[in-house]
Each structure stands twice: as C-alpha cells, then as structure tokens.
Image (cartoon, coloured by chain):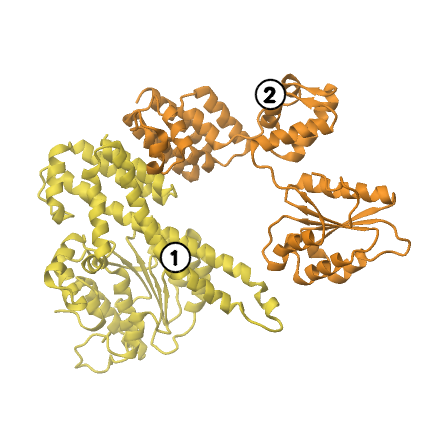
Chain colours: A orange, B yellow
C-alpha cells in the first residue's frame, strides 16, 4: 500500500478515493522526504485553488534546497492548462521536491482522465487506494490494522467489530488501534463486546428478511435499530415489498432446480434459492394479504400515516400475523 | 341546429354551446363600447365535466369566439354566432397560437405558484391584436394550493378586458378550491351521447361508419379515447389486453405476468414520450444557453446553464411520471368498468354496459362470481388508483390489486 517502500522518487501518483488510505499514502511520502531532509514540509493544494503559475512557484527549487512535498489534490478535476503544466514539470522534476498527485481514477475531461497514464509513463510510483467494497476486503483491512498497531485479532472479533463499528475505514482503523492498546495486543470477541455495543448498520433488507421468516422479535429489533440509525422509512418499506414479491414469485415452484428457473423469473439464482427457503410457511392466501400489507405501508411511509415509524412496525407485525394465520 | 364554425368541435353539448354563444355575442357588444344585458358575459368561467367531454375544447372554442374578427355586432341580420372558424383569429385561437390567449397546459404533476404568478402578470396587460385577453387553464385541478391562492385576486377582479377560463373534472373541493370556485361562473358539460361521438368521428376524422360506431360505443363518452381507439391499432390492443386480465387470472404465476404487463405498458408509454421530447428539448436549451459556441466569452456564457438544465430535467421527470400514471389510470378505469359491468349483470340490472363488446366475458364472470366478490374486486381497482395517486410505487400497488382480483376476497 505504501508507495515509499523502495526509496525516494520525485513523483508519486495516488490513485483511488478511499480517504484514509489516500491520507496515509501522502504522509508516507512526507516520511520519505524527511529521511532525506528532516526539515521537509508538506503543502496540500487542490487543483481548483491553484493557477499554473502558482504551481510552478511551488515546484521550483528554493534557494537553500530545502526538501518539500507538494500534494496536488483532486487531480481528476484538473484544468487543461494546469494539466499541461504538470505534464511539463514531470519531464524535468526539480531536485529535492516530491510531487504527489492524488487522483480518484475518474474524471470528466479528457486531459484529466489521461493524467494518471501520463504520470505512470513518466515513472511515477503508484499507490492504489481504491474503496473497499467487499466485506472480506474490510476484514483483511482490520487484520492488517491490528498488525500495524502491533497486535493481532481473532476472526470472530473481526466480524463483531465490523458489525458494531460499521464500514467506515477511518473508524475501523482507530477502533482497532484503540483495542490493541486497551487489550495489550490480542483482541478477542469478548474484548470487542466490552467496548462496543449496538449496531452500526442495519439495512431494510435485514428487517424484511426477518419479517418474512416469521422472526417477530428479531424483525422488530432490527426495525428499531434501523429507525434509530436513520434508515429512510421508504427504503424499509420498499425492502419489505421486495421480499414479499420475491417469495410470491417463487412460491409456486416445487422441486425445480433454482438455477433453471432463475432466468425465467428475472432473478439471480442465489436469490431464488434464498426465497425458496423463505417461502416455507407461506401460501397463496397469506401472500395476497402480505402484498396488500406492503402496498398499504408504502402509502403510509409516503405521508398517508401520521407516524411512519408506527406504520412500519404495524406492517411487520401484520406480515408475521398473516404468515401464521392466513 | 348543428353548431357551425369553431362550435362544431364541441361534441354533444348543445346547451352549453347556447350559453357560450350568448356570452360571446354580449362580449362583442362590450368590445365595441355598448352595454349588453347584464349577466350574459362574465370575466371568469369554470368548465366542468367528465373526462373526455371536451372541457378544454369548449373553452378554446369560446376563446376563439371572443377573438373572432368576422363577427360584427352591428350587423343585426347576421345569423352566424361569433366563432366563424375561418378568420385568422379563430384559426390561431384553435391552434393555441393566438397572441392574446395564454394557455396553461400542465405536462407535469402540478402547476406551481411561480407559474401562476407570472401568469397573473401577463393577464394584467391589455389585449394586443384581439378584443380580449384570455387566460385558459387546462386541468385547473392540478393547481397546488399555493398556486390557486396566487390566482385568487386576479380571478376575482380581472382587468376590464381579461377573461379567465378554467377547466376541471368537477367543482368538488377536491378538484378546485372553494375560493376559486366561488369566483367563477360554472359551466357543466355532460357526457356526450354515443351517436353524436360517432357522427363527429365520421364527419371530422373521416373514419368509416362501422369503426366509428364501435369506437363510440366503448369509449364511455370520452371523445378523444373514441378517436384513439378508432385510429390506433396499439390502443385497441392495449385495451384488449387490459380487459383480458380479469378472466386470465387462474394460477399464482398469472398474477405477476398480468401485473407486469400493466406496469410495463405504462412504462413504455412514458419512455416513448421521453424519447420523443427529452433530447430535443435538452439540445434546444443547451443551444439557447450558448453550448457549442466558440470564441471569447463562451465559457462564461455557459456557466449558468447547469441550473437551467437541472430544472429542465426535473420537469421532464415530472412529465414522465405523469404520463406513466395517466396510462395506468386509463387501464384501471377500463378494469373498473369491467367489474362494474359484471356487478350490474349479477344484480340483474339492465343498465347499459360500459364495455358492450365484452358482453360474453361479463356474462361468464357474472355466473361465476358472487356480487360481494365482484364488489371487492372493484374496490381493489379503485384503491389501487388512489394508492398510485398517493405516490405508492405503481408496481407494488398494481400487484396488490391483482392479488385481490385473483382471490376476490
């Protein structure tokens, strides 16, 4: 992850939009610069706030050749003239100056999109800082964080931590570092539970899944968490409707391979499989009632009911009641 | 007497035409400086009537009659009422291009306050080429509360030569606020009889007699719908597929295919409209805001364009939603008509059918279903209409409805 491992280079490219990782990459360049010159300082400038002339001033060697790190932030929005100035500079970098270009990898204009390729061609060290989207990636991140802080963490503790802290990397990193300090190096699930309680993220789908499987207590708990965390009511109502519809769609399938009907139903196979498991306990009568319930609650959360919170709870209870006594 | 000139467009409304012609004659007298009998002409009118009865057509014909330039109030021998349909003023008025007639035809879900405020300003001016300044608001039921209030003052005491023409399905407070209603003269239109609709289709649109009579019999008094059904193959197919729904619901799977058909058809309608208009409108606006220009100053000229484009996109989205809802509403009304027919049959009433061409299906359904279950199905259709109006996702509302149609309890 760190671009600075292989010794100093006058040019760095930080690609990606995961804020924490970008920050770390920039700081690591500063560390490298300080090894060369302990007085080196870091100036962060946004491409929108700077003119080519100002950039040239920042990038020209000073009289006493102090080390300097210039971080050019938000380079995906770079203007044409500034992009030309950067392209001109990288051909002949000044001594003692480290230029770090931070770019999300996207960009609208042609010159902004092409900038990363140009820098790579000019020999820039590249640090990839893409957003971590998969749960496994986040778990690996937490494990690395624990190692970085000089400790280790149990797999069960990792999942407990992601459940209670959420998916924001900055929060995960600081929570992990704190836990390493507090527990003396080895983080167990108990330790996580001692310091962190509750749930950081509950989706409407989690509520809906519990509601259609008849888990009254679980569904209501998830719903309370969701409303506590500010999940929009409309999203929960839509998730309920989607869950009921999915079950209704697969309810008439008996003993057929889920993979063969997936295309016909317009759903991915895993969804068919899951819905088939959830469809136990439902029949056509109870499903019709359930569809009416989710249609009602859809109107309720859009202003028909005085309290959308109550409307959702009532709908969840009615769904569970419909499943038991159609 | 068959109406002449612009009045021939107004189908089956002889009484209303009489009132409007008297008013237009009085208006012509006022225009030349005389004082006609009081009460004939009024400064604000509210046209009400069932959908398709021709509210806006009647309003437009009246506007044309007010502007008509061939009618001479001094010529006592003249038998023609104002609104000859031949002169320039009549032509432009009927085409919506007359300089003194301001038409408000909402494409979106509602008419905004801002729109009404600018309208009030425009209404205060004197007529430029014609005798009257006419403000015509189609679908006054889409006025928001604020927009209706912005209109109040102007409708109550308009300038001397300004006339307000408002159209709404009814004068019920749900459609038109009581404050607007009390400031207007009410003109109710009736459902035009099938014979007259057929005659208009034959005479004006050149449709052969059989098709015209068939279309007029199944359109439930909606002139525009009759013409569409008579001329558009797709509209006929759509209506057939909607009316097939009730008897095709046998298994649970059918439920989703039927709901899917209904929703998809509406979505396609909206997409067609968007395809036709969105890009062209966008390009026109971009060009107007200076896109594609070269040379000095083009960058600063286009800077403000983003906001205007966002605004346009918002209006286009509103229009797409409305198109989709209108299409669904039409289908739901056809369905409701079917269940109504079944109900009249099961109860042994001899009332004329809404869908006479489906008498066979209606009889089949009537022999299989109890009146209670038919009524419950009818209620489900009407509930779905209300739900869609309350912003429920169309697909969810329609699926819930079809589930009830399937079970009937």
Which residue position holds label 2? A156
Q: Residue furthest right?
A: A64
**Vertical order, A295 against B224 (above or below):** above
Please name whichever residue, B26 or B131, is drawn nearer the observer in this view of the structure: B131
Q: Residue furthest top?
A: A190
Please name whichever residue, B89 or B218, is drawn nearer the observer in this view of the structure: B218
Picture coordinates of residue A57, whole percent (x, y) = 80, 59
At x 66%, y 41%, the residue is: A19
Q: CA distance from mark 2 to mark 1?
A: 52 Å
Q: Judge from the rendering whether residue A236 lies leftward or rightward of residue B249; answer left or right.
A: right
**Vertical order, B178 against B157 (above or below):** above
Image quarter hosting the N terminus of chain B: bottom left
Q: Give the secondary structure at mark 2.
A: helix
Q: Judge from the rendering whether residue B163 lies leftward or rightward of residue A185; answer left or right.
A: left
Picture coordinates of residue B158, whole percent (x, y) = 39, 66
At x 49%, y 58%, the residue is: B311
The subunit letter for the residue under badge 1 reads: B
Which residue position holds label 1? B274
Could you classify mark 2 by the number of other residues whose Cα lies within 10 Å: few (under 14), some (14-19), or many (20 or more)?
Answer: few
**Vertical order, B106 against A261 (above or below):** below
Count of numbered badges drawn on the protein:
2
The subunit letter for the residue under badge 2 reads: A
Q: Judge from the rendering whether residue A251 lies leftward or rightward of residue B13; answer left or right.
A: right
Image quarter hosting the C terminus of chain B: top left
Could you classify mark 1 by the number of other residues whose Cα lies within 10 Å: few (under 14), some (14-19), or many (20 or more)?
Answer: some
* Residue A163 visible in image: yes
Q: Give the secondary structure at mark 1.
A: helix
Picture coordinates of residue A201, whole percent (x, y) = 55, 30
Picture coordinates of residue B155, whole percent (x, y) = 38, 62
At x 43%, y 34%, the residue is: A239
């Amino acid at each position: 992850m760190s671009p600075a491992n292989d010794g100093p280079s006058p040019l760095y490219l930080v690609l990606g939009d995961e804020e924490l990782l970008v920050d770390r990459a920039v700081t690591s360049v500063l560390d490298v610069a300080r090894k060369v010159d302990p007085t080196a300082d870091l100036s962060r400038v946004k491409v929108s706030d700077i003119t080519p002339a100002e950039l040239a001033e920042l990038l020209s060697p000073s009289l006493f050749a102090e080390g300097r790190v210039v971080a050019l932030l938000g380079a995906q929005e770079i203007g044409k003239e500034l992009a030309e100035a950067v392209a001109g500079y990288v051909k002949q970098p000044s001594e003692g100056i480290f230029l770090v270009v931070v770019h999300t990898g996207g960009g609208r204009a042609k010159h902004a999109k092409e900038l990363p390729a140009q820098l790579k061609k000019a020999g820039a060290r590249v640090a990839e800082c893409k957003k971590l989207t998969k749960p496994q990636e986040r778990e690996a991140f937490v494990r690395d964080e624990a190692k970085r802080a000089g400790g280790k963490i149990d797999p069960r503790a990792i999942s407990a931590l992601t459940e209670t802290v959420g998916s924001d990397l900055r929060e995960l990193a600081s929570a992990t570092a704190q836990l390493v300090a507090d527990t003396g190096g080895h983080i167990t699930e108990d330790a996580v539970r001692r310091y962190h309680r509750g749930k950081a993220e509950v989706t409407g789908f989690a509520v809906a899944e519990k509601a259609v499987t008849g888990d009254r207590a679980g569904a209501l708990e998830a719903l309370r968490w969701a409303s506590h965390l500010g999940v929009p009511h409309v999203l929960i109502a839509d998730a309920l409707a989607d869950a009921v519809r999915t079950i209704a769609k697969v309810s008439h399938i008996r003993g057929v391979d889920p993979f063969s009907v997936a295309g016909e139903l317009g759903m991915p196979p895993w969804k068919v499989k899951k819905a088939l498991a959830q469809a136990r306990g439902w029949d056509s009568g109870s499903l019709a009632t359930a569809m009416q319930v989710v249609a009602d609650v859809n109107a309720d959360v859009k202003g028909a009911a005085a309290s959308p919170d109550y409307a959702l709870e009532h709908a969840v209870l009615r769904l569970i009641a419909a499943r038991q006594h159609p | 007497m068959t109406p002449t000139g612009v009045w021939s467009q107004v189908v089956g409304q002889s009484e209303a035409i009489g009132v409007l012609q008297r008013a237009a004659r009085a208006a012509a007298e006022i225009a030349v400086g005389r004082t006609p009998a009081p009460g004939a002409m009024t400064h604000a009118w509210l046209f009400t009537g069932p959908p398709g009865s021709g509210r806006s057509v009647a309003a437009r014909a009246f506007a044309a009659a007010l502007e008509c330039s061939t009618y001479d109030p001094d010529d006592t021998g003249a038998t023609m009422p104002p609104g000859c349909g031949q002169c320039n003023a009549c032509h432009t008025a009927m085409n919506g291009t007359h300089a003194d007639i301001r038409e408000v035809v909402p494409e979106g879900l509602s008419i905004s306050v801002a729109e009404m405020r600018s309208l009030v300003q425009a209404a205060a001016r004197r007529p430029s080429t014609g005798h009257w300044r006419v403000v015509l608001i189609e679908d006054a039921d889409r006025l928001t509360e604020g927009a209706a209030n912005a209109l109040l003052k102007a409708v109550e005491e308009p300038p001397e030569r300004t006339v307000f023409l408002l159209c709404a399905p009814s004068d019920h407070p749900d459609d038109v606020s009581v404050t607007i209603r009390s400031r207007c003269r009410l003109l109710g239109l009736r459902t035009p009889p099938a014979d007259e609709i057929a005659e208009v289709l034959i005479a004006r649109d050149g449709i052969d007699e059989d098709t015209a009579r068939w279309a007029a019999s199944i359109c439930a008094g909606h002139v525009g719908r009759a013409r569409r059904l008579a001329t558009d193959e797709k509209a006929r197919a759509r209506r057939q597929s909607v009316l097939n729904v009730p008897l095709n619901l046998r298994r649970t799977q059918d439920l989703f295919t039927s709901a899917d058909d209904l929703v998809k058809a509406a979505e396609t309608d909206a997409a067609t409209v968007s395809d036709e208009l969105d890009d062209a409108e966008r390009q026109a606006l971009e060009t107007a805001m200076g896109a594609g220009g070269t040379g000095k100053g083009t960058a600063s000229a286009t800077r403000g364009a983003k906001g205007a484009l966002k605004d346009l996109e918002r209006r286009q989205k509103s229009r797409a939603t409305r198109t989709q809802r209108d299409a669904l509403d039409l289908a739901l009304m056809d369905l409701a008509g079917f269940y109504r027919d079944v109900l009249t049959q099961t109860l042994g009433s001899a009332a004329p059918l809404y869908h006479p061409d489906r008498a066979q299906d209606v009889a089949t359904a009537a022999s299989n279903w109890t009146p209670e279950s038919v009524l419950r199905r009818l209620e489900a259709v009407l509930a779905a209409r209300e739900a869609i109006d309350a912003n429920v996702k169309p697909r969810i509302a329609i699926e819930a409805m079809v589930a009830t149609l399937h079970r009937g309890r």
